[in-house]
Image (cartoon, grey):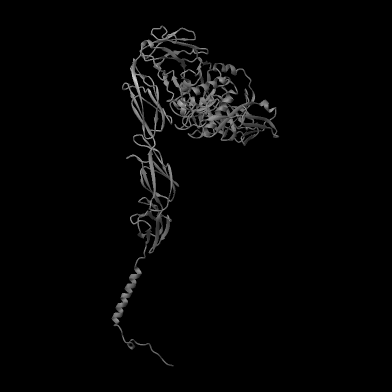
Amino acid sequence: MMRTRRPAASDFPPRFPVSSIRSRAILLLAALAVVGCKDKPTTGSLVVTVNGLPSAAPAAVRVTGPSAFSQQVSATTTLDGLPPGEYTVRVETVHFTDALYTSQTTSEKHTVTAGHTESSTVAYELASGMVDIHVSGLPSGTAPSLVILGPGFNRTVLTDGIVGELPPGTYELRADTLANADGDRFGAEQLSQPFTVSASLTPVVMSVVYALSSGSLTINVAGLPAGLSATPVTVTGPGSFSRNLSVTTTYRGLAAGTYTVSAVKATGLCPNYYLPDVASQAASVSIGTTAGASVTFAENQIVAANLNLKVDQVHLVQVVQDYNGGTPLVAGKPALLRVFGLANQCNFATPKVRITISGGSPIDRMVAEGSVREAPDQGTLQSSWNAIVPGEIVQPGMTVTAVIDPDNAIAEANEADNSLGPKTIDVRTVPTVGLRFVPVTVAGATGNVSADRVDDLLALSRKIHPVLAYDADIAAPFTATGAALTANDGDGWGRVLGDLETKRVADQGSNPTARYYVGIVKVSYNSGIAGIGFVGGKSTLNWDYIPSASEVIAHELGHNYGRNHTPCGNPSGIDTQYPNSGAYANGFIGQFGYDLASELLKPPTQFSDIMGYCSTKWISDYTYFFMMQWITTHAASLPDVASAAQSAKVGGEVPSLLVWGRIVNGQPVLEPAFELNARPQLPQPGANRLVGTDDSGAEILSLSFAANRIADLPGDHQSFAFVIPVSLLRGRSLAELALTSGSRTVRSRASGEIGADAQTVVTQVGPRLARVQWDAAKFPVVMVRDVVSGQVIAFARGGDASIVTSDTGRDLELVYSNRVQSARVVRRWR
């Protein structure tokens, strides 16, 4: 076998020295070591390239990213050292030299990784055009009145020149008529011109040519003294133009046409007066010209022998009155008598006036001013001869006769026209109205009612309502459960008012001599719902803040008297018959009011009607008259309080059924019915229907009825409570009641046997505070009555309620209902 050997180093010719090889190996290892220890990249880059903009236009690009990174980019830029993550490039419109530049891409997202460079290209393009407006025909310094209208575009232009940044589309250039500083009016030859704009830096050229479109009129007035307060010259013309003047005046900017210049006598310092040379003349005004007219007054002096005095009008005012005295008075209430005397010329006469009322003894009154006026002034008390007429004299059939200068102490041209009357005064008998203030407890807070606060609560009602008097008492406290009163919660307020109305009906039955119930509540806010009331009903609910509660009560009682809102302060339920024009516009009272207590006049356009929502309240003659009409034509329900107690003793109480509920925005709610002894009266027919059935489903009762609308709440809130005789059930047992309003029907069926144990427990939990507990699953509502007074003091809900009582140590009658039938039990709560 052949043997081989490993070649020796000596067999090869050496190319490098051994020592050199060793050195290079060491260097190689060192280099590898260095390469192996170098750090890896931790950031990346983003290149934002911007093109399409003019060279001087900055881009509107913003880059945002991790760790709240945000940087504005105005040109092509490389963003280095970016932490890895997602970056957003947002592109916004560029506004530059009347042009818009936009990008089709408004937002891009880029993910930056370590050691890599991302790129984003923002391509702008021109996105607007422009118009160059040339204006001519206007005086120097007068700016045009132009409007450019387009798709989503509306810009007013007050100068000519370039208007840029217009998105492509079709536009309208509208030129409005304008007036310069001198009052001359200019109109454009073309009021409207269309034009189309494309994306271009070359403007569309538009021309607007103005021309003078008005004339002028100079009225030369001569002969009047300086400082004359009267304006005896009147200029009227086209377009309802009307001006009064007393000095030379030029009117510019007039429409072409015929103008009438009228002049009347001007009174200066007595005995001087001034008569015009021309009473009426015409002036023709043309465009671009100035017409003229002249009025010259001649000074004259009155002739004392020509003086004539007369009684122009007589009226009495209790609250509000028109000049002719057309507002009726309430019998038995005092009134201010005003006699308005007039003179035919300026004078220094101070005659007395003799007044005779209903054939009684004459009363003489002296004028409070140093002369007799030439025109009546109802707004100044001193301008008339006045007297307070006691209430016992203000009676139906009352007459007034007034004579100025009855003793002929002042020389007159005519002594035969100094008397007026006897004038019959419209006086109507209005009964005293009975009110019952009810302190209402809601969510533990009770309205503040006490004998010493009643006068404050009724202060405004007694002043402005057309009633002889209010007779008020205070009921036992009433607790309303299951509701809350908040600033804008109409449902909560409506529910409490519904409970109060049901209490009124249960307390008084259908007694036609029943009092109005004025519920008083305490709320935790001072701006929001302050009061509500039934329109044409007999219950209101009001907060207890004084003095505002006085206005609230006067307003809500006005609703009870059949009045809707007057148009002031944007209320709902406006009275469409209110004379909302002239002095009555926007709900003002329209005629002068008078406060007998403070002896102050209420100017017709400074005071708003009580039935509106504005401040500075009084009452208009319109509202006053119709309140009075309601009160006098509903006399059966507005009795003299003195006869109320006697009327209540007449009797007529029979076993009856109390039915109550509400209708909120069309949704009917039927509360549990209660059996009680009362004087029933069937409800007025209306759009709603109540049906009762027995256990077999047979109909045993059917009534249509109208619910009472609640004013001052958002939406449509109505409520009802009435007492029907059990005899209408024809001896059959009621098993279900159904209420239908519109297309909606709700049903109340017995929730348990009426003979079942209601588990009623009454305990005292504080002074005048009782806790009532019962089985609410079977008997959802308990009517709580004070045994002594018979008044309802709560409709308790939920099985556990705290009730404010009228006194300590009394028994409470608990009437619990299974929705259609009821039973009662007496519990002592101490």
Residue 565 percent coordinates (x, y): 50, 28
Pick whichever, 533 or 654, lies toward us: 533
Query: In the rendered image of this protein, does residue 516 appear above or below residue 62?
Result: above
Residue 527 figure quarter = top left
In what quadrant of the picture does the N terminus appear?
A: bottom left
Residue 453 percent coordinates (x, y): 46, 22
Query: In the rendered image of this protein, does residue 610 appear above or below residue 347?
Result: below
Residue 224 percent coordinates (x, y): 33, 21
Residue 803 seen anywhere in this rendered image of the structure: no
Residue 650 figure quarter = top right
Residue 423 seen anywhere in this rendered image of the structure: yes
Query: In the rendered image of this protein, does residue 514 appear above or below residue 760?
Result: above
Residue 341 figure quarter = top left
Pick whichever, 781 or 253, lies toward us: 253
Outermost residue, bottom direction?
1
Residue 752 percent coordinates (x, y): 64, 34
In what quadrant of the picture does the C terminus appear?
A: top right
Number of marks drawn: 0
Pick whichever, 483 or 422, lies toward us: 422
Pick whichever, 767 or 26, lies toward us: 26
